[in-house]
Amino acid sequence: MRISELPEEEFLLPGNAACHGCSSTLCLRVVLKALGKRTVLVIPASCSSVYQGMFPKSAIAVPVINTAFASAAATASGVKAALLERGVDADVVVWAGDGGTYDIGLQSLSGAAERGEDMIYICYNNEMYSNTGVQRSGATPYGAWTNTTLSGKKEHRKDVAEIMISHGASYVATASAGYLLDLYKKVRRARKISGFRYIEILTPCPPGWKFPMSKSVEIAKLAVETGMWILYEYEEGKIKLTGVSKAIAEGKRRRKRVEEYLFSQGRFSHLSSEDVFEIERWIEDRWRRILGRNVYAAPAEFYV
């Protein structure tokens, strides 16, 4: 499958208020193509609640409910129940940033996952509170500059995808703005499954990560190619590596040096050799944990 073969109908319209080079809009465009028009989006406070535009006009051509930071999954639970009561067949999808997922929204997310609510929760992860001035979040990686970690964050990020697996979610997947067909296929896969489904997308942010706006896709690819971000899907107790991550695990592709990723961004320009070593140690540990689970390859036709 090629990008040119994606559905032509657009649900994210021109004229939205996103920053130049915003990779979350690129991903939302693809996600909505995968979902189709019978979709209701629940969007908590985030960049998306700004760039969608002001009521009564919107750059998103499906129904959208804006909600408070902490309550996206709870709101989506109620929306799904109301639609079922009215006999309306539609996908209820949360589209939330990492602040509304990793931190402020984690409680309602955990509750919805534990209850097995029939929804798709998608976190577009730009690893900080981008919309409110680039503050640290639970998704911010070790060493990264933000306006609240001026000398670099001292903690590693938590892993919400792993938390959702531990909740017994029906389907969990990771994706990247650098590999849009992988994202499209995972959203299509999630639509075919009932219960609680979670997808997390790495979405680089040019102003927050301090790189040229033309480099968003390149940076998103480097995250995967260096092992900082692993592409996989989880279903029925098994993890399936996909795309470049699968090729790295099978020895068909060599992992790039993490410095290529780190020093392509101003937020890591201050790192010492000791910091880089600590990030490399974290990457190796994460790969060991992923590969130590029940991992197998997805069917060949999945890959581009």
Image (cartoon, rainbow, N blue to C red):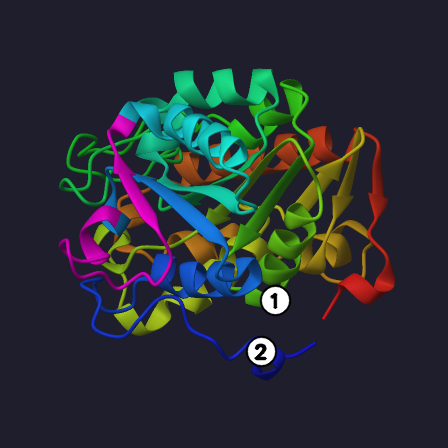
Which numbered dot is residue 181? 1
* Main secondary structure found in the magenta portion: loop
What quarter of the picture does the N terminus occupy?
A: bottom right
For disc 1, the neighbor class at 10 Å (few under 14, some 14 to 19, many from 20) is many
Q: Residue at x 59, y 32 (%)?
A: 118
Mark 1 residue element: helix
Q: Does residue 264 appear in the picture of this structure? A: no
Q: Residue at x 82, y 52 (%)?
A: 298
Nearer to us in this view, 178 or 113: 113
Mark 2 residue element: helix
Q: Is residue 272 above or below residue 118?
A: below
The residue singled out by tag 2 in the image is: 3
Q: Position of residue 96 (x, y in %)?
A: 37, 40
Q: Residue at x 42, y 34 (%)?
A: 274
Residue interval drawn in magenta: 49-69
Verify CB contact (< 8 Å) between mark 2 and mark 1. Answer: yes
What quarter of the picture does the C terminus occupy?
A: bottom right
